[in-house]
Image (cartoon, rainbow, N blue to C red):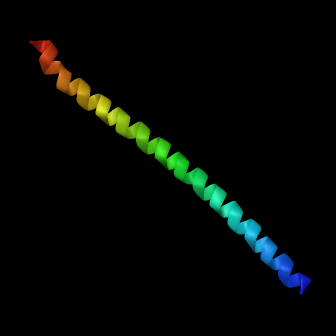
């Protein structure tokens, strides 16, 4: 019976480790996505301001 308990505990540790790495992966993806979207918006705003400043 103790073998089954250690197996369940080991499975729980593996699952918790996977969820932590999954959360870190999600965080990295969000930061990268936010960075690219802000850069894209910056480029669009500069393009939009060029004709206004030209006149």
Task: Indicate whether 23 appears above or below 8.
Answer: above
Quarter the C terminus occupies:
top left
Where is residue 5 drawn, in percent x and y?
A: 84, 79
Q: Quadrant of residue 50?
A: top left
Q: Position of residue 20 (x, y in %)?
A: 65, 56
Q: Position of residue 37 (x, y in %)?
A: 36, 39
The structure residue drawn at horizontal position 84% and vertical position 84%, both measured from the top left corner, is 4
Locate the N terminus by quadrant.
bottom right
| Image point (24%, 31%), residue name | 44
* 20 to 48, vertically: above or below: below
The total of numbered circles placed on residues is 0
Left or right of 44: which side holds 36? right
Quadrant hosting residue 35: top left
Q: What residue is shown at x 56% (from left), y 53% (from top)? A: 25
Left or right: residue 40 compared with residue 26 = left
Q: Relative to residue 21, is residue 1 drawn left or right?
A: right
* Residue 31 percent coordinates (x, y): 49, 42
Q: Quadrant of residue 41?
A: top left
In this rendering, is residue 5 above or below 41? below
For the point 59% across and 54% down, which residue is it? 23
């Amino acid at each position: 019976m103790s073998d089954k308990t250690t197996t369940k505990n080991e499975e729980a540790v593996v699952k918790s480790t996977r969820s932590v790495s999954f959360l870190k992966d999600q965080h990295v993806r969000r930061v990268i996505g936010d960075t690219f979207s802000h850069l894209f918006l910056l480029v669009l705003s500069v393009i939009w301001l060029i004709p206004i400043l030209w006149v």
